[in-house]
Image (cartoon, grey):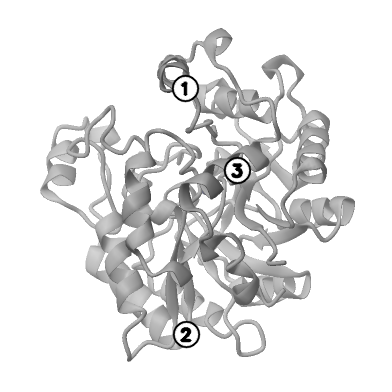
Amino acid sequence: MPRIIDIHMHVGLIGDKWPEMGRMSAWYRQQLTYKIFLLYAGISPDDACDQALWDKTVDTLNSCDLDHVVCLALDPVYDGGGVRREEASHVWVDNAFVIKLKKAVGPKVLFGASVHPYAPDFRERTAQCIADGAVLMKWLPSAQQFTLSDPRARNALEFLATARNGKPLPLLLHCGMEYAIPTMDPRTQSYDLLRWTWTDKTRNFFRRKRDKWNTPDINGIHDTLKAGMKAGAQIIFAHCGTPYFAGNILGGLIEHDDFPVVKKFIKKSTEPGYSGTCYGDVSAFCTPFRKKYFKDVKKLPSDHILFGSDFPTPAFEIFADAKEHHEDLKAVLKGQFERIIVPQDNLLDVNYRELRQAFGDHPMFSRFADLADI
Ligand SMILES: [Zn+2]
């Protein structure tokens, strides 16, 4: 039986009990997204503390029907000088926290490591994570405040290409708009983008000075990705770079879309000249917003798609009654908690079941076993 592997689950902590293992800022804990995450994780905001988050996470992992779930760390910001800046991160999760979780739950948990590419000891820390069982590396450029066009990111990606005894440690790279984990520095919001269109430029023009985004060096970012692929890297583009609202509510014109670039990179990696490979994951796809992308994802080479949830991002029973849906979605967007109907089953299972129904017998569900050699 092929094993079902969810490659994209977020875990986290507030920092009240284990402050050395991560933190969520006071500001972040006031945000609607945070409250929605708690709701979907099954925790009431008044009860939120490290112990409650831990208990719920362990319970969710133990009770789900999946074979493996990659739980993700998130390294804090390292500034341009390579200095670790935990206080400059709204959310960070230490690698040790995921290792602790893996010890508590067992082999069902796979270790998704995170090491900032500006960390002066990037190679040593990455090697230690691999020794501790890391199956991939997670980067979120906007919130971690680095750009892929920096030579340190390029060196780091080339290092990942052969980091596991000559084999790659896959990189799970966030791309496109980020709503879940905001950056403390608005200028870096553009660092997840893989293209910079006239709409992006126009939007930026009208932003107040203190809210303006840095213009990303798109050529530099692509050069880093290509250099990584030449060296043999495995790059997984989270959410296939698709916009979250996906044209249903905000309209494709309004929301940035990196899907065309991701498609190109995936295609490029099937051509000769690159020993590396590009993939896209379908995490946070279990929403009516992204349903219209299912047919496009089905057209991509099937071995290049990976299954994931992005837990605790809301998962919807997308094949349920359409009207119920609509009401649910409106309630989520307005933050009307009392009207949101959270699926009663384990959310990891709901996500799997719905995507299985959408994609049928697709290799995405077990494909990661080959990448991680498990
Ligand atoms: Zn995510």
Q: Amino acid at mark 1?
A: Asp
Assign a secondary structure to mark 1. Answer: loop
First-in-chain label (2 vs 1): 2
Q: Amino acid at mark 2?
A: Gly
Q: Is residue 213 above or below residue 16?
A: below
Disc 2 target residue: 232
First-in-chain label (2 vs 3): 2
Distance in Å between CA atoms under marks 2 and 1: 45 Å
Expressed as whole percent of the image width and height from the top left, the position of residue 212 reads: 25, 39
* Residue at screen point 31% across, 54% down: 296
Q: Quadrant of residue 264?
A: bottom left
Q: Is residue 362 above or below residue 285?
A: below
Which mark is in front, 2 or 1? 1
Task: Report how many numbered discs are placed on residues in the image.
Answer: 3
Q: Amino acid at mark 3?
A: Arg
**Quarter of the image that includes the C terminus:** bottom right
Q: Quadrant of residue 229?
A: bottom left
First-in-chain label (1 vs 3): 1
Mark number for residue 121? none
**Quarter of the image that includes the N terminus:** bottom right
Expressed as whole percent of the image width and height from the top left, the position of residue 58 reads: 81, 41
Disc 1 target residue: 321
Which mark is in front, 2 or 3? 3
